Image: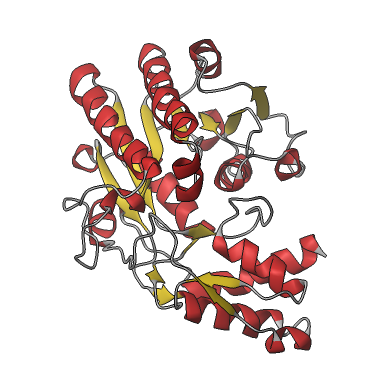
Amino acid sequence: MKTSSQNTILITGGAGFIGSNLSEYFLGLGHRVICLDNFSTGHRHNLKDFINNPNYKLIEGDIRNLEHCKVAVVGVDYVLHQAALGSVPRSINDPITTNDVNVSGFLNMLVAARDAKVRRFIYAASSSTYGDSEGLPKVEEVIGKPLSPYAITKYVNELYAEIFSRTYGLETIGLRYFNVFGRKQDPDGAYAAVIPKFVRQLMNLESPVINGDGNYSRDFTYIDNVIQMNELAMTIENQTAVNTVYNTAFGDRNTLNDLVGYLKKYLSEFDPKIAEVEIIYGENRAGDIPHSLASIEKAKKLLGYNPKYSLQEGLKEAVSWYWNNLK
């Protein structure tokens, strides 16, 4: 691997929550970073801290356009592919657009990376791929049937990546993200993730609505653990660790009731009235997996993964960031 200042990294979806955090981190290490984003879900304010960095380049384009992808990969060493339309409910409401972005766009990026002879293609996979598999913890080699159009698209990504590795020799690594949260995650919009949405509501002294009885559980994963996994996937030289997928998680699970309890506790340190906000319970949501817990043994063994932030440790950081940036 070249010295840090000599690598050029393309981050698709680089104006989004995860992509902008990755951009900031790798710029801080002296890498050159190119961002490809169409701002359909990303935000320009996520780029404000580094938009003027001489090592940063923003390309406004769409992964559904092959020419945009080809322009973006010129001179690139590594691709960190984060661009996607997330959200299970969005995919249920509009499966065609979700498929266009997540499958056709993904294939465009693979073709562009192959033709540009990119060294390695690391992509955001998803825990939704486990589908109706009931076993816990989730082990990479055992999956079920997908429960949503979104889950189908993310599984198809893994199949395409494997074919491009076998057929064209493109090195790929998929990272199955488990409920990622942290700074810069958007609290607004119809498809906002649960943690920033609940934070916003609690800060406004509004009652969050939990889908179901609150006993569904998740392996919530703080953004810095995700950054660590991307860096390890990019830099690992052991070939037995390449051309596969890894769970990207903390390896612990908490219920939604646990989550809200922690949020109220940490936010009430800023405003004591938050501790008294009532929680509302609604119907279960279509396509939701009841329980999710990752085995991270494969990532530990092959990549040397060592996540630093539990849910509680990550929430303390995230809550502080939201309080200082949303008020």
Q: Is residue 121 above or below residue 312?
A: above
User: At 73% across and 34% down in the image, what residue appears?
Assistant: 53
Q: Position of residue 327 (x, y in %)?
A: 83, 65
Is 263 placed left or right of 104 in the picture? Answer: right
User: At 49% across and 34% down in the image, what residue appears?
Assistant: 3
Here the colouring is: secondary structure
Is 39 placed left or right of 162 in the picture? Answer: right
User: At 55% across and 47% down in the image, what residue appears?
Assistant: 18
Depth check, front residue: 161 or 197:
197
Q: Quadrant of residue 285?
A: bottom left
Q: Is residue 311 above or below residue 18?
A: below
Q: Quadrant of residue 156?
A: top left
Q: Position of residue 302 (x, y in %)?
A: 24, 51
Depth check, front residue: 278 or 217:
278
Is 322 placed left or right of 118 in the picture? Answer: right
Q: Position of residue 154 (x, y in %)?
A: 35, 39
User: At 36% across and 29% down in the image, what residue appears?
Assistant: 120
Q: Image quadrant for the N terminus?
A: top left
Q: Position of residue 7 (x, y in %)?
A: 51, 29
Is 293 placed left or right of 32 in the picture? Answer: left
Specify the farthest residue to the front. 283
Depth check, front residue: 119 or 94:
94
Q: Is residue 21 above or below residue 198?
A: above
